[in-house]
Image: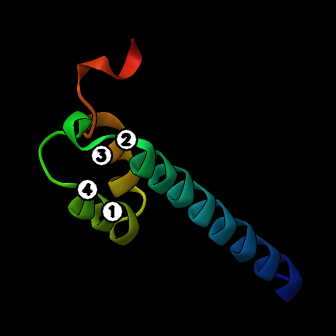
Amino acid sequence: MNNTVILVTVAALVSAVVWFDSRCLADLARTSDRDLRYVNRNTWALVIVLSFPVGPMLYLLYAKGPRRYS
């Protein structure tokens, strides 16, 4: 494979990871403490940043209370 193709692919994947993490962290910053479930804000931030792609998905599925979609 051409080195340029590999470099562009890696750059696109890194960009997607950074974008997804930043969107989840921005949502976490806007969420009030009483709406967070299971663990505190700092722990959710670590889960999001350190365990991609599972961490952001866990945050989106489990971090907020039942009023999330109302």
Residue occupied by mark 4: 41
Judge depth for marks 3 and 1 and give the one in front. 1
Q: Is residue 50 above or below residue 61?
A: below
The residue beneath circle 3 is 58
Q: Mark 4–mark 1 contact, CB under 8 Å?
A: yes
Q: Earlier in the sequence, mark 3 or mark 1?
A: 1
Q: How many marks?
A: 4
Q: CB of mark 4 within 8 Å of CB of mark 2? A: yes
Q: Which residue is mark 2?
A: 31
Residue found at x 77% / y 79%: 6
Residue placed farthest to the left in the image? Answer: 38
Q: Which residue is located at x 34 percent, y 72 percent?
A: 50
Q: Position of residue 60 (x, y in %)?
A: 37, 39
Dot 4 falls on a residue whose secondary structure is helix
- Give the mark, 2 or 1, whose residue is nearer the N terminus: 2
Q: Quadrant of residue 48?
A: bottom left
Alpha carbon separation for disc pair 4 and 1: 6 Å
Relative image position of residue 34 (x, y in whole percent):
20, 37
Left or right: where 20 falls relative to 68: right
Distance of mark 2 from mark 1, alpha carbons? 12 Å
3D distance between C-alphas at marks 3 and 4: 14 Å
- Crowding at dot 2, Cα within 10 Å, few <14 / some 14-19 / many 20+, comes out as some
Of 67 and 51, nearer the camera is 67
Q: Secondary structure at mark 3?
A: helix
At mark 1, the secondary structure is helix
> For the point 25% across and 34% down, which residue is it?
35
Q: What residue is pinned by disc 1?
A: 45
Q: Amino acid at mark 4?
A: Arg
**How far apart in space, not on screen, are marks 3 and 2 (Cα)?**
15 Å
